[in-house]
Image (cartoon, rainbow, N blue to C red):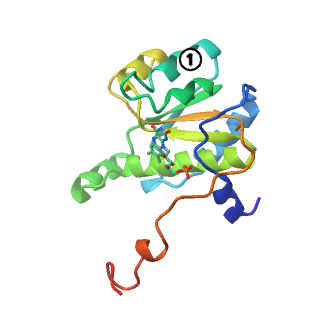
Amino acid sequence: MKFNDLILQRYSVRRFKPALVAREELMKCIEAARLAPSASNSQPWHFVIADEPVLVQQLAKATFSSLVAFNKFVHQAPVIVALVIEKPKVITQIGAVIKKRDFPLIDTGIAAEHFCLQATELGLGTCMLGWFDQKKIKQLLAIPKNKTIGLLIAVGYPERAEPPVKKRKSLADIHSFNGYKKT
Ligand SMILES: Cc1cc2nc3c(=O)[nH]c(=O)nc-3n(C[C@H](O)[C@H](O)[C@H](O)COP(=O)(O)O)c2cc1C
């Protein structure tokens, strides 16, 4: 798939077919994430892939509540991936303090998109999830308390073949040359 087609094809899938996802396909997505750039090449990530049905249902339950129910669709996903943020190299940690930048957060965001784009190319659908009960997810996946889960990614085969039209700010709204919002 051409790169531009790929980014148009990727969308947040919220309706999945019940079909299972082969581990080989998931490993291709992890490989794509592995090749992502990161500050000082720290690669501060660990992917915990849940594909055991009972566990996946328990995880899905921790992404919504009766009050905040927009992630209820996650119950349909056959796979949930937890992206754990690992400590970067000491040099990156020092740089982050001096420059007040959260490099691992940036790095894991890039890796997550690599994962999702590769998944799209394989005909899979993904939805990044920022809203979840972190304590519960850590318990279920035996992730140490001192770690942070940057994102969850729901993965499965999308019910709908064609992506919806992208709702985005206009090009004019998001860029300027040679100075901030300079016209
Ligand atoms: C950091 C992050 C957190 C997100 N959290 C959620 C979430 O909890 N639930 C959800 O349904 N979508 C979530 N999304 C998906 C966004 O809503 C979606 O990417 C955005 O609306 C653009 O739509 P598209 O991905 O279909 O192009 C998240 C996306 C990102 C990048």
Location of residue 136 by image quarter: top left
Image coords of residue 71 (percent x, y)? 48, 31
The total number of labels drawn is 1
Image coords of residue 73 (percent x, y)? 56, 29
Q: Is residue 129 above or below residue 1?
A: above
Look at 45% across and 50% down and name the residue there: 107
Look at 22% across and 57% down and name the residue there: 98
Q: Quadrant of the N terminus?
A: bottom right
103 vs 123, left or right, is left
165 vs 70, left or right, is right
How packed mark 1 is, by other alpha carbons closer than 10 Å (few <14, some 14-19, many 20 or more), is: some
In this rendered view, identify the residue nearer to me: 154 or 51: 154
Residue 146 visible from this viewpoint: yes
Location of residue 123 by image quarter: top right
SS of the residue at dot 1?
Answer: helix
Kindly give the residue lying farthest to the top in the view shown.
54
Q: Is residue 182 above or below residue 127?
A: below
Does the residue tagged 1 have its C-beta within 8 Å of any atom of ligand 1?
A: no
Q: What residue does disc 1 label?
A: 57
- What amino acid does circle 1 point to? Gln
Q: Is residue 73 above or below residue 88?
A: above
In this rendered view, identify the residue nearer to me: 111 or 8: 8
Q: Quadrant of the C terminus?
A: bottom left
21 vs 49, left or right, is right
In this rendered view, identify the residue nearer to me: 107 or 66: 66
Image coords of residue 81 (percent x, y)? 56, 31
Residue 42 visible from this viewpoint: no
Look at 49% across and 74% down and name the residue there: 171
